[in-house]
Image (tube, coloured by chain):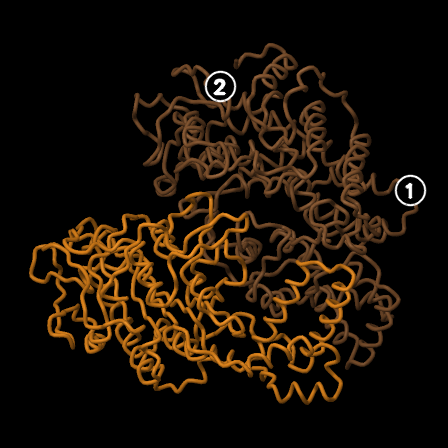
Amino acid sequence: MTPQLSRRDLFKLSAAGILGTSVSGWFNVLASRAAETRARHKSCILLWMDGGPSHKDTFDLRPGTAQGGPFQEIQTSVPAIRISEYFPRFARQMQHAAIIRSMSTGEGAHGRAKYYLHTGYKEGVGGLNYPSIGSIAAMEIGNPSNPLPNYVSIGNRSYGSGFLGPRHQPLNVVSPARGVENLRPLVDSRQFQNRVGLLEELEQSFHRTHEAGTSLAHRTTYQRAVTLMQDRGARAFDLSNEPSASRAAYGNTVFGDGCLLARRLVETGVTFVEVTLGGWDTHQNNFNRVRTLSGQVDPAMSALIDDLRQRGLLDTTLVIWMGEFGRTPRINNRGAQPGRDHYPRAWSSVLVGGGIRGGQVIGRTDAEAATVTERAVTTLDFMATVCRILGIDHNKLNQTPIGRPVRIVDRGANPIVQLV
Amino acid sequence: MATQLGGMVVALGLLASAPWTMGNGQAQSGKKDVPPAAKMDSAALAKVIDQHINARLKEEGLKPSSNSDDGEFLRRVYLDLIGVIPPSEKVVAFLDSTDPNKRAKLIDELLEHPRFGTYLGEMWAGMLLPRESNNRRLDHRPMQAWLADSFKNNKPLDKMVYDLLTAVGTQQANGAATYFILNPTADKITDNVTQMFLGVRLQCAQCHNHPFVEIKQNDYWGMAAFFTKTRVSLNPKAAAKQGAQISVFEGAAPPKGKRNNLPQGAKIVPAKFLQGEQPKLDPKEPYRPVLAKWITSPSNPFFAKAMVNRAWYQLFGRGIVNPVDDMHEGNFPSHPELLVQLTEQFKANDFDLKYLYRAICNSQAYQRTSRPVGDNKGDKEFYSHAAVRSLSPEQLYDSLTAVVGNPGKDMPKGPKNNFRKGPASPRDAFLSFFRIDEGANPLEYQSGIPQALRLMNSPQLAGAAALNRILSESKEPAQILEKLYIATLSRRPTTQERQRLVDYVGRQADLRTGFSDVLWALLNSSEFGLNH
C-alpha cells in the first residue's frame, strides 16, 4: 500500500524545488480549510433496504393473526412500542427513534419506487432528471470546502445529482473493505507528484491560450481529486484503521462495515452517506430471509447509534431506515416457502437521532397492517420532514440548466409536526 | 389537408394560413409571394453560412479569431463526424500534406468512413430510447444498427423518420420497432417525437399549460392521440420470462372515452397536428402514418428546421436556437436568416444529412480556432471562435482506448447492465460511469471527482502496452515525444514543449519512467479530454 503524502512531505518537497509550480493550486485549498471554523451542520445516514422490506415482519407486526407470520414481538425501551424479536439490540435504543407506520406512497414497481423515494419526484415526469436527497443535502448543507465529497454512497451507486450537475454527484464505494475505487496512485507518491506537476504545466499552458470554462472546470475537478487522494480525511475510507473489536460490534458483515464507514465519514464532516443492504424483495421465502437480514441490520444499526451517541454526534446526525415500499399483509403460498409481495399502500420507516423527539410512533394501520388509519405519510410528506430535520428549506426553488424552477420537494407536502 | 396537392402550393398555403411564428424570428407576412430558393451545392451553402456569421460578427463589433491549425481542425472534425481521435498515421499524413484542398477531402473521407453511421446511430439511439428502469432488460443494439445503416447509406432524413415513426414488428425483424418498445406509452412516445422531430418540449404541457409559450394541454394530448392505437404485444418482464420477442403493431381504436395506453390524468381529445389542423382519422387504418406524413412533409413548419438545428448543435455544441429542442416563440434563433436558408436548402436537397454536414464543416465558422483573441473571449453565441466542448462518454472511451488499447476482462464491472443480457462490457461499464446526466450540455464540463480518480489511477488506462510499443520502435527521446503527442493530441509538440519535456525525461530514472509520466499527463490533460 503506497503511503499517503502528508502535508509535511509536501512542504519538504516543495522546498526542494521538485514540485515546481504544481503545488500553488492546492495551497489555497489547504490554507482555507485550516483557517475555516464552521458551525456543525447536520448529517444524514440513509440505511437503504433495497427491495422493499416487509413492514409486517419488522416494525408493524400482527403476531397470532392468520396472516401475521411466525415472528414474535418484543418490548423496547419505550413501553408502548413493540417491534420484531429480531431487533433486540435496536429495541434498547427506541428512546432515540421514531417509527413511521403510515407510509403510503403509491408506487409499487421497484425502479419507479426507488427513484420516487430517493428524489421525491416520479421518474421522467416533465422530462427532467431529478436530484436525489443525498445530492440535495450535499448542496444545501454540505461544507463546500470539504476535500471529501459531501455525498457518499456505499454498496450501491444510488441516485445522482440530476440537473444539479456534477459537483454533487455521490462518490460511490462499492466495497467498504476495499474503500474508494482508484484513490491510490499507480506509482509511488514522489513519482505521482512529478506527474501532477507535469499535468499542471500542461493545464496552465492550455488555459493561457484558450481561457475556456470547460478547461477550467476540468482542471478544478482534477485538483479536487488530487487533494482528496492526499487529504488526511481520506483515511476515513480506510477501515483497516479501525480496531477489529468495533468491526465485530457492527456484526462483521459487509453491511456492518458499511455502517462503520458511514460513521467515520460523518465524523470527518461528510453530509450524506447512504449504505445499501439488498435482498429484501421477498416474494419467496419471506420469513427466513427477513430473519437473516434483520440479523444483519440489528448489530450494525445499533452499534452505529451507540457510536454516534458516544461521540456526541447523534443529535446532529439523522439515521433513516427504509426501503422503497412494504410488503403484502397477505402471505402468498405460490412457491415452496411462503412469501410477501410488493405493497406501497401502508408500510414502515424508522428515523433515529438528528434532534428529533424519540420514543414515538407516527401513524397507525388497521388490524391487518394493510390500510393506514391515522396520519398517512406520503412521499412528499416524508421528504419534507427529512428536509426540515436536516435544516433544508423544502420549498426552496432550484434552477435547472435551462432556468426552469423546481422545488426541492414538490408542492403539497405536509411535514410530520411531531418530528420537526 | 393531408393530401398532397403539389409540394410548393401546399407549402405556400400553409405558410399563409399559419398564425404562429414558432422560433422563426421572421414575420410571415410578405413571404407569401417568394418562390422557394434555388438549390445550391454544399460549397455554396458553406459560403452562405459564413456570409451570415461574419455579417453578424461585424454588427456585434466582434473580431473573429483566425483559422484553426491543421492539427486542431483534424482532431475536431474526426471527433465530430466519427466520434474518435485520428490514428497516428492519419495525423502525420494530414499534417504533412501540401494539398490545398486537404480539409475538404478529409471531410468527404470522414462522411464515408465506416464509423460515420455507427457513431451517429449510437448517438441518436441514446436520444430516442430513454434509459429508465422499465427498460432494463431491453436491447438498444437493433435500433443502433438500423439507424447506423440509414446514416451510412445517407437515406434522406424525411424517409428515415417516416419509417421510424411507422415501424411495426419485432426489434429483430425491424430495428426501428425498438423505438416503440422502449417508449410504450402514448405520453412517452409523444414526448420524444415532439422533442426530437419537431424541436419542441411539450412535456411540461402534459400536466399544465406551458407557463411562457402558447402551448396548451390540449396541444399535447392532441398529438398523443395519434399513438393511442399503437401497441406492444408483451411487456418486457413477460417477454424476458418467456424468451419471446416483443412485437409492435396498431390495434383497434380505443372505445370512445377509454384511456388504453394513455396515462392517468390524460385528456382524451381528438388527434390534432401541433398548431395545425385536426385530420379525420379512419379508425380502421393505422394512425401513425398520418402523423408521420405530416411531420416529414416539406411543408411541415417544424421538422426540417429542427433537424438543421440539431445538426448544427452536433457540430458547434449549441443550436442556432438553443436549447436545441426548445424552439418556441420565446426562444430566439441567434441567426434567424441563416436558419431559414439552411432549412430551405436542406429541403431543396431532399433532406440529405451528409450534404448538410459537408456544408457546415467546410465553413470558416466551423473551422475557426478555439483560441479567443482580445474581446471575443466573452462571446458564446456568435461563433467568433470555436467553443471548447466536453467529450461525450463514447468519444472519451473510444479515444482513450485508441491510445492505450482495449482493456482486458479486469476492467471494473459497472452497475448491472441495463440493456443486454449478461454482465456489462468494459465499454458499457465505462459509459455508464461517465454518463452524468442524459442530454448534458456539451459546453459544460460534466465529470466529477470519481471520474477524475478513475482516469488518473485506473491500471487499465495506464497505457503500458502502448508505451512499450513506441519505446521499442524509437530510442531517441525527441522522436518518442513526438509519437506520444501525435497519438494523443493529434499534433507535434512545440519547440518549448520539446525542450521542457525531453529535459524532464532526462532527469528521471529511465526513459520508460519519464515517458510514462508524460503519457499520463497527456491523457489527463484538458487538451486530450476536451473537444477544442
Q: In this orientation, which residue lies closer to the viewer: A66 or A386?
A: A386
Q: What is the chain letter for disc 2?
A: B
Asked if one can make out residue B368 in the rendered structure from this viewpoint, the answer is yes
Q: Colour of chain B?
A: brown
Looking at the rendered structure, the kind of residue marked 2 is Glu
Residue A175 locus on image (x, y percent): 44, 70
In the depicted structure, whether residue B457 falls above or below residue A382: below
In the depicted structure, whether residue B287 falls above or below residue B362: above
Q: Give residue B102's quadrant in the image.
A: top right
Label 1 and label 2: CA atoms lie apart by 52 Å
In the depicted structure, whether residue B106 falls above or below residue A57: above
Element type at marker 1?
Answer: loop
Q: Give residue A228's quadrant in the image.
A: bottom right
How many marks overall? 2
Residue A271 locus on image (x, y percent): 43, 71
Q: In this orientation, which residue lies closer to the viewer: B179 or A315?
A: A315
Residue B55 locus on image (x, y percent): 79, 38
Q: Colour of chain A?
A: orange
Looking at the rendered structure, the kind of residue marked 1 is Pro
First in sequence, mark 1 or 2: give its number: 1
Residue B518 lies left or right of residue B417; in this view the side is right
The local crowd at label 1, few if under 14, some if 14 to 19, many if 20 or more residues have their Cα within 10 Å, is few
Residue at (72, 54) in percent of width and height: B378
Residue at (36, 81) in percent of width and height: A247
Residue A7 lies left or right of residue A83; in this view the side is right
Q: Which residue is mark 2?
A: B277
Residue at (40, 45) in percent of width and height: B134
Instruction: Give the label on residue B100, or none.
Output: 1
Q: What is the chain letter for disc 1?
A: B
Residue A265 locus on image (x, y percent): 43, 76
